Image (cartoon, rainbow, N blue to C red):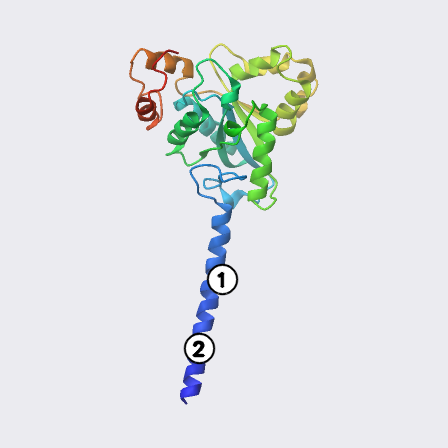
Amino acid sequence: RISWAVGRRCAWMFAGLLRRASVTSAHTRLRAMAQASSTSPAGGIRTDKLDLGAASGRDGVVLLACGSFNPPHKVHVRMLELAGDALSRTGVQVLGAYMSPVSSRYEKKGLVDAKHRVAMCEAAVRDSALVMVDDWEATQPQWSRTVDVLESVRSRIREALGGAPVRVMIVCGSDLIESFTVPNLWSEEHMLSLVVENGIVCISRPGYDGRKTLEGIDSLRDRQGDWRTLFVENDVLADLSSTKLREALASGDPIEDLVPEGVEAYVRENGLYAGGA
C-alpha cells in the first residue's frame, strides 16, 4: 500500500510538473517575442508594444519615423499616433510604431550625441501605448539612408515575429516630402520604394503640400494609381519644430508644454542646447 501511495503521489507530482513546464514554455515563447527592453536588443528590435494579436494579419503594418529628434517634441510622437489612428480607420492593422534617431555621423550643426537623443526619445514615448524607439540607425558608424533603415526594421521585426509578413510605412511631415524635389538627394528607385512599395503616411505641415509635391514628380505621377500613401491633417502644434525648441532652450524659455514629460528634465540635467540653437 505504501509503494502504491508513493507511486500515485509521484505520478501526480510529475503531471503537475508537466503542466507547469507547458505554461512556463508558453510564457517563455511570448516573452521572447515581446522583448520588453528599454533599448533595442543586440541584433534585434523592441517588440514590447507591438500588437502581437494582430501580427498574423495579412495587412500588418509597422510605422517608422526617421529624424534627428534634436530634441524630440510632442508633434513627433503625436504624428505617429495620428498615422496609426488614420490607418486603423481604413482597416489596416497597425502593429506598432518606432522613432529612429539619426546617427551622430550625420554631422548636422547643433546635433547632440546620439546617446542623448535616444534617451530623450525613450522619455518621449514612455507613456505611449504605440510608439517605441529603435536605436539601430543611431548606432551606425555612418549616416543611413531612409530606405536602408526601413529594410533593417522590417528584417528584424520579421525575425522577431517568426517570419510573419510585415510592411513598414514611413511617417513624415509634408516638409520632408518636399525634399524629394531636391536634385540628387533622393534616387528614383528610393522614392518609388517608399511611395509605391512600402507606403508613406504624410502629416501636414504649414506651407507644404505633400500630395502636390508627389504629383509634380514624373516617375511618381506615372505610378499614381499604385501609391500607398495617406495624407493626414495635423491636429496639434502644427508649426512646432526642434529648431524652435533649441532657440527657446538657448534663451532659457520654458518648454514643458511643447515636449513630452521627462524630455525637458533630461535636457536640463545634461546641459543640452544651452549654447545656442
Q: Which residue carries the number 1 mark?
A: 22
Q: Position of residue 80 (x, y in %)?
A: 47, 28
Judging from the image, what secondary structure is the residue with disc 1 in? helix
Q: Amino acid at mark 2?
A: Cys
Query: Crowdedness of circle 1 by 10 Å Cα count: few (<14), some, many (20+)?
Result: few
Q: Position of residue 28 (x, y in %)?
A: 48, 53
Cα–Cα gap, marks 1 and 2: 18 Å
As displayed, is residue 91 above or below residue 200?
below
User: Which one is nearer the viewer's eye here, 33 or 79?
Assistant: 33
Going by the picture, which residue comes out furthest to the front?
A: 141
Q: Position of residue 128 (x, y in %)?
A: 40, 34
Q: Viewed as shown, does residue 265 lie left or right of 49?
A: left
Q: Are marks 1 and 2 in contact (CB under 8 Å)?
A: no
Residue 155's disc number: none
Residue 78: quarter of image: top left
Q: Earlier in the sequence, mark 1 or mark 2?
A: 2
Any part of residue 82 in sight: yes
Judging from the image, what secondary structure is the residue with disc 2 in? helix
Q: Which residue carries the number 2 mark?
A: 10
**Quadrant where the C terminus is found in the figure:** top left
As displayed, is residue 53 above or below residue 77?
below
Residue 125: quarter of image: top left
Q: Amino acid at mark 1?
A: Ser
User: Which one is nearer the viewer's eye here, 183 or 86?
Assistant: 183
Q: Position of residue 3 (x, y in %)?
A: 43, 87
As displayed, is residue 195 above or below residue 15?
above
**Quadrant where the N terminus is found in the figure:** bottom left
Any part of residue 239 in sight: no
Q: In front of the other: label 1 or label 2? A: 2
